[in-house]
Image (tube, rainbow, N blue to C red):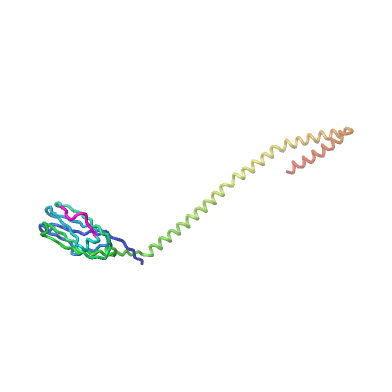
Amino acid sequence: MRCGESTVPETLAVHLNRDRLHAIEAPDSFETADSFVVEIENHGEAAHAHLRLDDGLAEIASLPTGNHYVRTGTVERVPISVRDPGPLTGTLTVATAYGSETHDIEVAVEPAAGKQAVEIDESLIEGSNSTTTRSSGTASTTTSASGTSRSTSSSPPSTTARSGTGRSSGIETPGLLAGTALVILVGIGLLFLDGPAMFVGTIAVLGGLVVAGYLLLY
């Protein structure tokens, strides 16, 4: 197990006139590690509340104003700014009825105050990592299968192209054979003549036979 720290915002609750007129209810001590808020709730008649920091606490903390008018049934929030994490202990005094009622609160400013240890189960972290790994493997397999499918589907067009080429050659071959046959016939006719005509006829016959043989074989 590992522990982490989380800072909980600090609020100092003060109640006025809850049990009797001018009564002040607040804790006797308060710990904080940072700035905090004094929350004054008035349960009775409207009243003036005065907040005062002693000299020690005033060295590292301050409040916007000391006097606060709190109406009946309302809550006044007074922020107290802490400039230094301490450690230091001082006194915050709450007074009502023009100082006739007071309550002193010992305020301890400690660097570790208000921090709570939060336990984190390491098995949860390990389980999260395992899930991420399995998800990545599944994505890779899916991508590979998709690539194979695309490769297979791209094969038929090349077969079609070859088939088209074969048909084109088949259409031209009969015409070439007919022309070759005509040349051979002319050559045979020239063989019956004397002189150069006989020589030309011989060449024509031989050439025609060669061309015809090539066309028939290929």
Q: Where is residue 109? Give x, y as percent.
A: 25, 64
Pick whichever, 91 or 32, lies toward us: 91
Residue 6 is a magenta residue: no
**Residue 162: where, in percent of width, then height?**
64, 43
Q: What stretch is highlighted in magenta?
A: 61-69
Task: Say left or right for 175 vs 162.
Answer: right
Which residue appears farthest toward the bottom when viewing the image?
A: 1
The quadrant holding residue 121 is: bottom left
- Specify whether 60 is left or right of 148: left
Circle count: 0
Percent x, y of residue 119: 33, 65
Q: Write down the quadrant of residue 165 in the picture.
A: top right
Residue for point 45% across, 57% down: 135
Question: In this rendering, is residue 25 above or below 183?
Answer: below
Q: In this view, does 185 lie to the left or right of 34?
A: right
Question: Where is 30 relative to 164, above or below?
Answer: below
Q: Which residue is drawn at the image coordinates 19% and 59% (left, top)?
A: 13
Residue at 13 percent across and 57 percent down: it is 96
Snapshot quadrant of residue 200: top right
